[in-house]
Amino acid sequence: MHKKQLVCIERLEIMEDKFGVTFEGLNAEIDQDESILTLNVYGEMHPTNGTSIKQDLAITVTAFDSEGKIIAITETTVYEEKFFALENFHMQIYDITSKPVKIRVYPKADV
């Protein structure tokens, strides 16, 4: 049996402000096929001013269980030199150990 469930998403606006970006259109779903859980997170990153970002950034997704424990983390890099106006993203975490109840999405400096 294949099921999809929506998950609550939390943005860290203080981090978005620090790096001059904002996230829009965020959506998170859990796909469950038998006992395998897959988390899919979708969204867009926009600069708060202009059409560029000031540095390479990592978009980070952290998943939490009902006890507030981190159960999965993934990130993808957005490169300053390739960025223009917006970046659409789809991030996927396969075979997570339990159903997340909260997802946090935030930017951070890519090192």
Image (cartoon, rainbow, N blue to C red):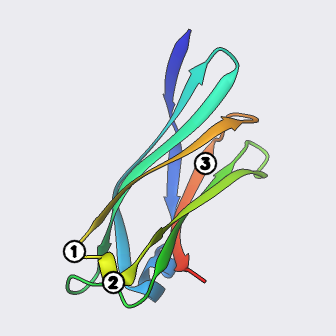
Q: Report the amino acid beneath label 1.
A: Ala
Mark 1, residue position: 85
The local secondary structure at tag 3 comes to strand
The quarter holding residue 78 reads bottom left
| Apparent side of residue 16 relative to residue 66 in the rendered image (left or right) | left
Which numbered dot is residue 27?
A: none
The quarter holding residue 20 reads bottom left
Task: Please report the residue visible at 50 percent of the width from the left and 52 percent of the height from the top.
Answer: 9
Image coordinates of residue 5 in percent, x first then y, are: 51, 28
Q: Report the amino acid beneath label 2.
A: Glu
Task: Please report the residue visible at 61 percent of the width from the left and 83 percent of the height from the top.
Answer: 111
Note whether 28 is above or below 21 in the view shown. above
The quarter holding residue 53 reads bottom left
Q: Report the amino acid beneath label 3.
A: Lys
Answer with mark 3 or mark 1, whichever residue precedes in sequence: 1
Q: Does the rendering let one see residue 65? A: yes
Q: Does the rendering let one see residue 12? A: no
Image coordinates of residue 29 in percent, x first then y, are: 48, 36
The local secondary structure at tag 1 comes to loop
Mark 3, residue position: 102
